[in-house]
Structure formats: C-alpha cells, structure tokens
Image: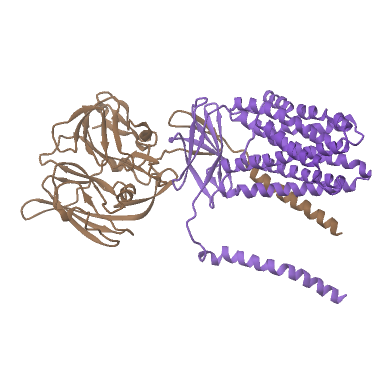
C-alpha cells in the first residue's frame, strides 16, 4: 500500500515538475527578465474588418490586431478627416473590436477609402470598391435569403437524390463507380472550401491571426471531431451492417451540409456587399453544382432498404444549411466567422472522403485500383471542375 | 475508465475551443450606456453611447495655443550699441524629444525651437544688430538657418551644432520683409517636417501702417512617416481657428505675415472668403504685387497680406486645395462691428 502511494506521488510529481519550470520561466520573462529580451520596436496595428454603408453613415468595424493596446483617435473618408463616434469606446485592448460610425452622405456604387488613425498618428486604410447599402435584418429579407438557400441547397440536393433508383439497379462495379464518384466530388469540394478559406484569410484577416495555420487547425480539428463521432456512430449501431450505409450517408449529409453553409455564406456576403449580378451567377452555378451532391448522398444508400422520410431528412440536412449560411453571410458577415465555417466544412468533407475510401477498400478486396474506383474519382473531380466554372 | 476520461477530455477540449472561438467571432457584449448627442463640424448629428472622435480642441486642453502664437512677437533683449544702433539678443533652445498632442488623441514627436512648433516669431527693425544665442539641447545636431542677408559663416549650414553645443549667430537685420528660419542639418526634410522652423520679421525703419498683425505658418505633420502629410494647419493645430475663430474688427486693417513651411506637398495656397487682400511677396516691397483672394505658395515662400472687412460676420479662410483644408488647414475670421467695440 505504501509503495503504491509513493509511486503515485512520483507519477504526479514527474508530471507536474516540468510544468512548474515552464510556469517559472514564463513568470521570469514577463517579470524581472523582461528587460533582457525586450528587443526591437513593437508597432501598433489595427485591422478594418468590415465597412457598412447605412443611411448617411459609414460604419466601420475595427479590431486591434497589434501587440499592444491602442486608442482609435480619428477617422477619415477618402483621406479627408471626418468627426465620428466610436462604440463602445476608443480604447482597444489586444484583439478587441469597436465600431466607428462616420456620418457621411455616400453615393451608391462609388469607391471609398476608409482610414482610421491611432494615437501614435499611424493611419490604417481599407478600400471599398463600390458602396452599396447594407442589409438591415428584417423578415422580408430573411425570407428572400431562405428562398435563395432553398434554390441553392435543398432543391438541387433533392433532385440529385432522385438518381437513387437508378443507382440501385446497377451492378456492383458500377455502384463502386458511383461511390468513387462521390469521393471525387467531395475531394473537389474540400479543396475548394480550403482554398476559399485561405483566400478570405489572406484578403481580410490580420496577420496576427496566422490565417493559413488557423485554416489548417480548424480543418484538422473538424476532421478529427467528426471522424471520432463517426466511428462511434458506426460502431455503436446495434443493428449491425445494415446501418453502415445509413451512417455513411448521414456523415456525407453532415459534411455536405457544412459545405453548403459555406456556400450560403458566400451568396449572402455577395448580396450584402452589393455584388448582385455576381450573386445571380452564384445562385445558378451553385444550383447546378449542388445537384451532384444529391448523388453523393444517394450512393451509399443504394444497397439498403430505404424510407422516403430518411432520404428527405438527409436531403434537408445537407441542403438547409445554405439558408442559414445566407442569413449569416448577409446579416452578420465577418471574415473570421467565414474562415471558421469554411474550414469546418472542409474538415467535415475530408472526413467523409476517408470513410468512403475505406468502405470502397473493404468492399473491393482491399484494392483501390479497379477501373470503377479510379474512373469514378477522376470523373467526380472533372464534373465538379466543369460545373464550378459556372459560378 | 480510461475511455470515459478520454471522452471527458475531448468534451472539455471541444468546449474550450468553441468558447474561445465565440470570443473572437462575436464582439463583446456591452451593457447599455447613456446616449450622447453630438453635432459634427459638418453639421451631421450622431447619437452614440460610445466615444466621440473629433479633431476639435478646447482652448483649455490644447498644448500649443495657436490663438496665443498668432499675435505673439518676440522683440528680444534690447540694448543700444556704441554706434547708436539697436542690438536685439535672443536665446533659442532646440530640443528633439518632446511628444506633443498635435490633434486630439494624436501624439507626435515634435522637434522644437523654444519648445513650440513653430518656434518664436523673431522680430527686428531694419538695420538692427541681431544676435541669437543658440543652444542645442537635443540628441541630434541642429542649426539655425535664417533666410536673409548675412555672412557665410552665419548661415547655419556648415557650422553644425552637436548635442549640448552652442553657437552665436549675428547679423544686421536686412532685408525688410518676412522670412523663415529653420534647422539646416541633413536629412533636412526630417528636421523641418518634425517642426524646427519659425518666422523672422524685419520691419522697415519707418514702420508699416498700424494694423491688427498676425503670423500664420502654413504647416503639416506626417505622423506615419509615409512622406505624405496626415494633418495640415495654419499654426500647427488642425481645424483650430475653425472652432475658435480669430476675432477682428470691421474697418480695421489686418496684416498677416504668412509663411509656407509645408513639407512633402510641392505647393500650398491661401484663400480668403468675402474679401480680397493686397499681397506683398516676401514683404520686401511697399507696393502690393496683387489684389486677390488666392495666392499660391511653394516651399518657404512667404509674404504679407493686408485686408479690411466692411461687413461683420464669419468669414472662412483656407487652402483651396481642399484636401489640405479637410485635413485641418481651415479657419474663420469673426469680424465684429468696430462700433460695438468697448473703448
């Protein structure tokens, strides 16, 4: 008993001691040792995250992305100083945000350069290519976004699901082709979402957020979380093998749902930024593009007995997030949110791909080199690429 | 047991990550505060619970008072030489470590002669002997270079005065007019842009007609060092005379000694509303060169303007290069009926 206790104490101590040293080192660096390593000059930095055009007012969201606290002391429009209000207050701690309200009679479709000056006299600016009235959240607009989301998300996915009876009747190797096709489609979507997230992070996110690493981290976390949950889902099913296709289809739906959320975000943001012509293209493109996603959900289900209700449920799970995405994108867009959601979607999709590939491996005698699988993957990517040109 | 722990840990990690994400994604919620109403100088009205960021100073809070500088002339310590001439002695101290609030909330490292930008307005009469005791209390070398006529070794160019050093400049006050003085140490642009300049006036022996005299140095500050001015002003403080108008009297001659010390922008100008002025370039001639409401000034170009208002009221004066005026180089003359004046 004694021995056991001492060993336990030793175990705990050996775990804690390195940690204690780390704490001491950090305390030293921040405390008495701070002069020793205080090299270089740290510069303040703020990032203009969002510019909104309201009725005779320009509203600018700023974030302190520098290494120290700053005061926001002046605002300008097109390099001309304008009095303004800042809420909640002008003092910004690290990573804190504030909203600068500049009374200004702006003109629709004209470019504006918004400048914000901090207490040391440094001016930060952001260009808006064309001013457009900001969307005020109201029921009418929410309904409008819901309709767009339905066109882009739910309807195309449902149409895609209609291929299910067809997939059902085909031979095993052709079925493998469709499973591989699904994986190919998803691979494309995953890369697409990652690229989009990286693009947003490069364009609008402050350097201090480490955009690329943020995307990588969120993609991986999302992948791991869903992978872990997915494995449990498949393992814990008491019905045995029959539920595996459902479980896979469910995960495909979740993955595609998260992806469609990202697409809704893009559409909502495009409308919010006044790029209306662009958003019409986006809507048509996404609708065609998303029909293929229905096939992705249908394929795993092809060999089981299915209920219409289950299919409809999966279709909505995959399609409806486009509506929520459009709401978020149109009403409360922030680059940070967009990157997070796009990355979660990408991670979810990569996770589904892994599950699909493993399934194909199990079914196809541990090989992935069959004509059906290779051509399915290839055609999946190609189809997606070609439909993506429409967007 | 281990499995449970793993699950618990995962839950904790997921919870921690989501909470920290929320912190970044959504701006912090703040409790409702009392709403203030604020009218901007362009007439717009804002109601806000937050702070107002406005380039307007109250006279009580301004560090450098443009109203005081405007009509302040330094005639020096006066004594008479053996030959009967007047000797004017000035002590000028250069510093380069002062941080000044040049516009509300904007702090900038100004380099100063006698603690201000612009430095003191040095005034002498034609033919006086001027002696400047220059002390450099800065960390860099500085000099004083006066425009005017003097000996080569009094030019403040080759006799660089190091930190802690002293130098005595001496010359006869000629020619009549309004001249700038400034530091002439390389890199020159840096020394001038930081504020090492001022005005030097030489009055004609017979004097000029009595007038309400004032000095305006047209200058600017490049606070983020991108070789473009962030602020423009007459006498350093942006928008100051707009919110604190310069009071003058109708039917009384106003004389402005105007000197353009702006760096980075090749030209500056001066437009007066509701009136025209007689302009004497460099102030060297007693006959006006032109009668206008608009003059253009290049670097260190200067002159004397004379005008009188007939009608009382508020009159704007500003750079007609609107960028400059909308970044601070704008002011107002408030002309009061001279009859109302309490004698």
Quarter of the picture containing the C terminus of chain B is top left
Residue at the extreme right: A239
Q: Is residue B267 left or right of residue A35?
A: left
Residue B31 image offset from top left, x and y in percent? 63, 40
Quarter-wise, where is residue B158 in the image? bottom left
Q: Is residue A327 visible?
A: no
Q: Chain B shown in which color?
A: brown
Quarter of the picture containing the N terminus of chain B is bottom right
Query: From the viewer's perspective, is residue A19 above or below residue B310?
Result: below
Q: Is residue A105 visible?
A: yes
Residue A235 image offset from top left, x and y in percent? 88, 48
Q: Is residue A276 left or right of residue A313?
A: left
Number of dots carrying numbers? 0
Query: From the viewer's perspective, is residue B324 above or below residue A46?
Result: above
Query: From the viewer's perspective, is residue A158 above or below residue B80?
Result: above
Query: What residue lies at 67% left-to-right and 27% top-to-bottom?
Result: A283
Residue B294 image offset from top left, x and y in percent? 27, 29
Quarter-wise, where is residue B303 in the image? top left
Quarter-wise, where is residue A284 in the image? top right
The residue lying toward the viewer, choosing from B285 and B129, is B285
Residue A66 image offset from top left, x and y in percent? 54, 50
Q: Chain A shown in which color?
A: purple
Q: Is residue A229 left or right of residue B55?
A: right
Q: How is the image coloured?
A: by chain
């Amino acid at each position: 008993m004694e021995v056991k206790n001492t060993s336990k104490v030793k175990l705990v101590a050996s775990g804690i001691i390195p940690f204690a040293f780390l704490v001491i080192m950090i305390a030293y660096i921040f405390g008495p040792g701070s002069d020793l390593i205080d090299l270089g000059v740290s510069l303040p930095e703020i990032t203009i995250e969002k510019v909104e055009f309201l009725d005779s007012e320009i509203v600018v969201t700023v974030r302190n992305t520098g290494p120290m606290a700053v005061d926001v002391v002046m605002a300008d429009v097109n390099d001309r100083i304008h009095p303004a209000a800042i809420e909640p207050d002008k003092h910004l701690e690290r990573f804190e945000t504030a909203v600068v309200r500049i009374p200004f009679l702006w003109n629709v479709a004209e470019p504006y350069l918004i400048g914000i000056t901090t207490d040391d006299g440094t001016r930060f600016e952001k260009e808006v290519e064309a001013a457009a009235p900001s969307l005020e959240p109201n029921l009418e607009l929410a309904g409008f976004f819901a309709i767009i989301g339905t066109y882009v998300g739910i309807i195309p996915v449902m149409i895609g699901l209609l291929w299910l009876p067809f997939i059902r009747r085909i031979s095993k190797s052709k079925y493998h082709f469709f499973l591989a096709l699904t994986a190919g489609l998803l691979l494309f979507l995953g890369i697409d979402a990652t690229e989009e997230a990286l693009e947003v992070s490069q364009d609008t996110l402050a350097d201090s957020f480490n955009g690329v690493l943020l995307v990588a981290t969120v993609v991986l976390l999302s992948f791991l979380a869903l992978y872990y949950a997915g494995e449990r889902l498949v393992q814990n099913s008491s019905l045995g093998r029959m539920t595996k296709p459902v479980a896979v289809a469910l995960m495909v739906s979740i993955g595609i749902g998260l992806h469609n959320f990202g697409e809704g975000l893009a559409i909502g943001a495009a409308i919010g930024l006044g790029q209306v012509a662009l958003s019409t293209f986006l809507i048509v493109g996404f609708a065609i593009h998303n029909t293929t996603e229905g096939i992705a959900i249908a394929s795993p289900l092809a060999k089981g007995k299915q209920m219409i209700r289950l299919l409809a449920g999966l279709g909505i799970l995959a399609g409806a997030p486009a509506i929520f995405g459009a709401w978020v994108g149109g009403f409360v867009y922030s680059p940070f949110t967009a990157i997070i959601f796009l990355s979660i979607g990408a991670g979810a999709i990569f996770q589904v791909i892994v599950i699909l590939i493993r399934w194909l491996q199990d079914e196809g005698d541990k090989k992935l080199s069959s004509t059906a699988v290779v051509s399915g993957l290839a055609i999946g990517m190609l189809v997606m690429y070609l439909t993506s040109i429409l967007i | 047991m281990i499995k449970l722990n793993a699950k618990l840990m995962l839950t904790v990690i997921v919870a921690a990550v989501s909470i920290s994400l929320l912190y970044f994604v959504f701006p912090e919620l703040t409790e409702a505060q009392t709403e203030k109403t604020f009218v901007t100088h362009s007439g717009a009205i804002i109601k806000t619970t937050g702070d107002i960021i406005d380039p307007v100073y109250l006279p009580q809070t301004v560090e450098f008072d443009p109203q005081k500088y405007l009509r302040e002339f330094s005639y020096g310590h006066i004594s008479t030489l053996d030959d009967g001439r007047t000797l004017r002695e000035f002590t000028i101290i250069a510093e380069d470590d002062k941080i000044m609030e040049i516009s509300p909330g904007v702090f900038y490292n100004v380099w100063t002669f006698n603690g201000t930008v612009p430095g003191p307005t040095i005034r002498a009469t034609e033919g006086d002997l001027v002696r400047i005791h220059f002390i450099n209390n800065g960390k860099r070398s500085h000099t004083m270079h006066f425009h005017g006529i003097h000996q080569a070794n009094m030019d403040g160019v080759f006799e660089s005065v190091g930190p802690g050093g002293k130098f005595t400049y001496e010359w006869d006050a000629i020619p009549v007019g309004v001249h700038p003085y400034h530091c002439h140490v390389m890199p020159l642009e840096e020394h001038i842009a930081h504020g090492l300049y001022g005005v030097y006036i030489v009055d004609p022996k017979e004097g000029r007609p009595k007038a309400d005299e004032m000095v305006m140095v047209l200058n600017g500050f490049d606070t983020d060092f991108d070789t473009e001015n962030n602020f423009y002003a007459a006498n350093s403080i942006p928008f100051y005379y707009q919110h604190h108008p310069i009071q003058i009297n109708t039917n009384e001659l106003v004389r402005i000694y105007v000197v353009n010390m702006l760096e980075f922008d090749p030209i500056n100008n001066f437009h007066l509303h509701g009136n025209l002025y007689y302009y004497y370039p460099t102030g060297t001639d007693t006959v006006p060169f032109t009668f206008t409401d608009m003059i253009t000034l290049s670097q260190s170009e200067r002159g004397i303007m004379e005008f009188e208002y007939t009608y009382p009221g508020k009159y704007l004066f500003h750079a007609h290069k609107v960028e400059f005026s909308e970044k601070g180089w704008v002011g107002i003359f408030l002309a009061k009926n001279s009859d109302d004046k309490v004698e």
